[in-house]
Amino acid sequence: MIMKRFPGGIHPKYNKELTADKPIIEMPPPKKVRLLLRQHLGAPCTPLVAAGDKVTVGQKIADTDAFVAAPVIASVSGEVTAVDSEGIDIACDSTNSDFKGQKQQYSSPEQLRQLIREAGIVGMGGATFPTHVKLTPPEGKSISTLIINGAECEPFLTTDHRLMLEQGEEVVQGTKLLMEACGASNAVIGIEENKPDAIKHLTDICQEHDNISVVAVPVRYPQGGERQLIKTLTGKEVPVGGLPLDLGFVVSNVATAAAVHHAVNLGRPLIDRVVTVSGAVAKPGNVRVRLGTSIADLIDFCGGLDPDVVKVVCGGPMMGQAVDDLNSPVTKGTSGVLAFTAGEVREYEERTCISCASCVDACPQKLLPNYLALYSKKGKLDLAEQYHLFNCIECGCCSYVCPSRIPIVKYIKTAKDRIQRRRRK
Amino acid sequence: MSDKLLTGHAPHILGGKSVSSIMWDVIIALIPVSLVSIYYFGLKALILILVSMASAMIIEGAFFAIRGKGIKHGLGIRDGSAAVTGLLIALILPPTAPLWLAVIASAVAILLAKQAYGGIGNNIFNPALVARAFVFMAWPSLMTAWSNPLTISNWLADLTSGATPLGGAEHSLFEMFLGNTGGSLGETSALAIIVGGLYLLLKGHIDWRIPVGYLGTAAVFAFFTSKFSFYDVAFNLLAGGMLFAAVFMATDMVTSPTTKTGRLIFGIGCGLITMFVRKYASAPEGVTYAILFMNALVPIIERYTVPKTFGGVKGA
């Protein structure tokens, strides 16, 4: 296996020891859930139910004809209490919310992809791109290798680590299904070296499977970025504006693979996911939680927030989103719920750029973040585009290293938004 | 939990580097050369360093206080950049320089070369070198009044006038490596400069491309213009202010390119100009003007060295 180095990258403090040894625990279904109509990248779904309807766990409650989308599945049984433009609220009947399913049958890759779609599966590493779309090679293209992303490079997060350790067999079964669905002849599972137990476990399992290999990849953020992982594992660079597909690759997260196994071999659609609850909470842990559970309920399950928490982040600390409303629900892409105290997320005043080029050296996409931030600030959008603005993956390395505390990624996102709005006009 | 949660943007955690931590590291890196200068040029060197640093900080503090309309704004000097500028100025003055010269140089650096452009980060030219160019033109005789280094047995004695290696003084390469020669405070000891430079490299505050480009070009230049003499190569690298400048001046973040290729080109340019002046101009040393000239070219160098983006095409 070739081991190439992607450019740039950083070594933030990983803080994974808080939850790395905590086995996944299951949170009982909450009293109510709120399922958002857009939990994926692409077109939002339209509700198939109305207030007052009874739903059973595993039932499809929202869908769309758009190709780039995945349906929303009821994560609990109960009664729909409200439907609005953004989501569906369900009062949970907790005694009847256990899911029982059976192995699904299929006779072609198309049918397999359809099963994956109907189960509501999207990329669970955080990008939430509908999985069946990714697995469908456009005409004239074929997929040679499936890459399973077990890098989990975001600090704090340990869901993929625990999944690989506790449900390694399921991850591998899911990997086989994904290969079948996209036509890949072999698969590589890339895992950061800081998870030796997971590497060993999956290597042992994969001994029985000639066409699946496990590769330990160096610890460096953002190793789990799909373009970075492809470079590390294959030495190839995904062309700007292109997709891994252009090189014959499909990248999928380990949690996605496990979800596919559940959907196909057990008939259990995507009704829950594992979330790392960590940081300043009473009992940090890895929790399997029903989708739509409110963050507040999840935090309560973990013993509540420490009194001096000032910020709660959904996802990892590098790319996740801060939530101001703890009633927001867990979605298909919520890999973590992290609580931070004032000392950990100090807000700094932005200073003048001193051209130290730390951002240039840290950028894994070989951009000039200093110029992108400057052009965004000055509204010079054409220049920003010329400097490859859209090749930014928003990993946050530039903002992390900036000694002048310039929120470079924020400026880059602003410029991207402005250009996209201008294009739509 | 506080009543209202913060909603700031990602990333939510930040690295430990700050402008002031970088400046403190630069000061730490300059400690070896400062100590060696005191060892060879006595108390005079120490006083020059202290006066130069103090005046740079006081002038910048006063400027902040007046512009911000309040004494507390003067605390803006906490970022340490004025202290670094003051220290650098002292280290590129001759040991016999009068104290008022250091004060004037500091004022030129802070007011003319830095604040007139809008303060830290906005200046085009290296402030300490602008100051040196200014006082060199205004008081050439004071700026070339070199002296012999002291010995430990007569460390408190007055400095006696003497020449620098570039000015014709005879020294062994080993003495030049240690710093036992005439010259500006900080430039004489290659050993101390290398120690400080390694510290900055280790801390990631300077990129090897600038000093290597600079010194490598100078070495090649010296080799071919001296009919392939290795002595000449070593002499040119050790003599004068080039080594000090390649490590501490050309690498100034604000006034050097941010692109990797640009840094190499910048270093090569500095090396070429320095050696042209040394070999073919009437001045003995060309470091100051080489770097100032290359500072002016930074925007254009960056424009033409936009890297090939990941998975993409070259340039912008």
Image (cartoon, coloured by chain):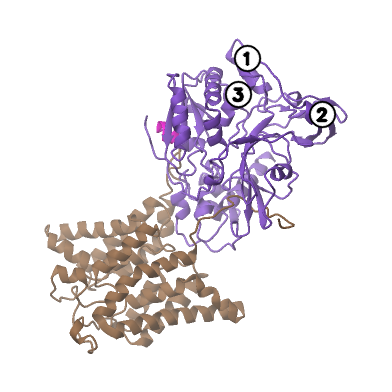
Rendered location of residue B251, percent (x, y)? 37, 62
Query: For the residue labelled by badge 1, is the local secondary structure a helix, a strand or a loop?
Result: helix
For mark 2, what is the residue? A78
Tell me which segment is drawn in magenta: A230-235
| Residue situated furthest right in the rendering | A52
Write down which chain is painted purple.
Answer: A
In which image quadrant can residue A28 be found?
Answer: top right
Write down which chain is painted brown.
Answer: B
Give, as a three-letter code, the residue at label 2: Gly
The earlier-in-sequence mark between 2 and 3 is: 2
Q: Give the mark toward the camera: 3 or 1.
A: 3
Q: Residue at x 17, y 63 (%)?
A: B234
Give, as a three-letter code, the residue at label 3: Val
For mark 3, what is the residue? A260
Could you tell me how many numbered marks the image carries? 3
The chain letter for the residue carrying disc 1 is A
Q: Magenta span has A152?
A: no
Q: Residue at x 79, y 28 (%)?
A: A95
Query: For the residue labelled by badge 2, is the local secondary structure a helix, a strand or a loop?
Result: strand
Image height check: is A203 above or below A396? Answer: above
Image height check: is A210 above or below A363? Answer: above
State the CA–CA distance, disc 2 to disc 3.
Answer: 25 Å
State the CA–CA distance, disc 3 to disc 1.
Answer: 13 Å
